[in-house]
Image (cartoon, rainbow, N blue to C red):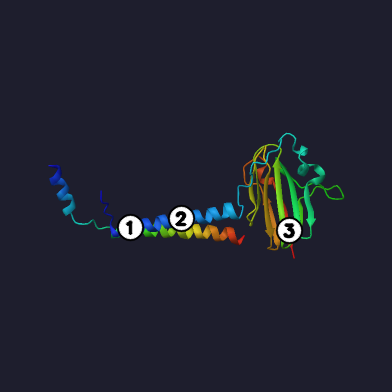
Amino acid sequence: MIMHLHKYEKIWLIFGIGSLIVFLVVLGYGAFWQGTHPQSHGVTIDPNNIESNEAFKPENLGLTKVSDDKYIVNIAASAFFYDFGKDEEGKTVNHIRIPKGSTVLFQVATKDVVHGFHVAGTNVNMMVEPGYVSSLETVMDKPGTYTVVCNEYCGLGHHLMYATVEVYE
Amino acid sequence: MQNLQKNNASEKEKPDLKGTFVSVMILGILIVVSWIGAFALFLSR
């Protein structure tokens, strides 16, 4: 059978298929060459005992300096609170400070229900599901104070669940 | 009878697809622009 396509049909088919190819190439490049993946990539944890994981032991929560410009932030999320550990005076930490240009690895786990972890204004935006460790590494290169918000409705106190991350020069 | 119908079909004038073409392109460009916008936002943050 000889198919007769209208001239315009050929143009919009090329446009559509071309866009699809460009999109898939960008997606494939991100996934296979740059290692972009979902934030919870199959790392499991016991939600009833997240302390059994080294990263979520009470003394390992919060900001830890790994090397000159590398940091790890471990957070235990629960209704309605982000646990960043305690400071030297034993006070609950709700604000962390990171020097500009640092590479920061955020690791979050939840003790109860599904929570969100969004450092508003950045690409750090994760769902935190019971039984999984959500992690995301990013370079914080814009100074400012960012609010960490829970963007998965987790109960009556959902709106009270926040913290702040300060990136300083 | 079938042959007759086929002949009639091939002799038909080409359909006027100009309006369809313009609307398909407007929609396509809108989708591409919004995708580029979201991607640029992702890259800049």
Residue A74: percent from the left, percent from the top?
Answer: 74, 47
Question: Residue placed at 49% from the left, 57% from the top?
Answer: B35
Q: Which residue is mark 1?
A: A10
Amino acid type, callout 1: Lys
Are the numbered discs 3 and 1 placed on the same chain, yes or no?
A: yes
Q: Is residue A48 left or right of residue A12?
A: right
Which circle, 3 or 1, is nearer the viewer? 1
Q: Earlier in the sequence, mark 1 or mark 2?
A: 1
Quarter holding the N terminus of chain B is: top left
Q: Nearer the viewer, residue A42 or A115?
A: A42
Label pair 1/2, CB-CB below 8 angstroms: no
Residue drawn at x 78%, y 46% as measured from the top left? A61
Per the image, the residue denoted by label 2 is: A21
Q: Quadrant of residue A50?
A: top right
Q: Residues within 10 Å of mark 2 (few under 14, many from 20)?
A: few
Same chain shared by disc 2 and disc 3: yes
Closer to the chain start, of discs 2 and 3, is: 2
Image location of residue A138, percent across then percent down: 67, 56
- Vertical placement of residue A141 versus A38, above or below: below
Residue A166, labelled with which disc? 3
Task: Please state if A32 lies on the left or on the right of A160 as rendered.
Answer: left
The amino acid type of the residue labelled 2 equals Ile
In this rendering, do the residues under marks 1 and 2 share a single chain?
yes
Asked if residue A114 is positioned above or below residue A89 in the image, the reply reads above
Residue type at mark 3: give it: Glu
Q: Residues within 10 Å of mark 3 (few under 14, many from 20)?
A: some
Please report the residue visible at 77 percent of the width from the left and 37 percent of the height from the top: A52
State the residue lying farthest toward the right: A89
Residue B18 lies, in percent from the top left, at 29, 60
Residue at the top extreme of this rendering = A48
Of label 3 and label 1, which has the lower sequence position?
1
Q: Position of residue A94 (x, y in %)?
A: 76, 50
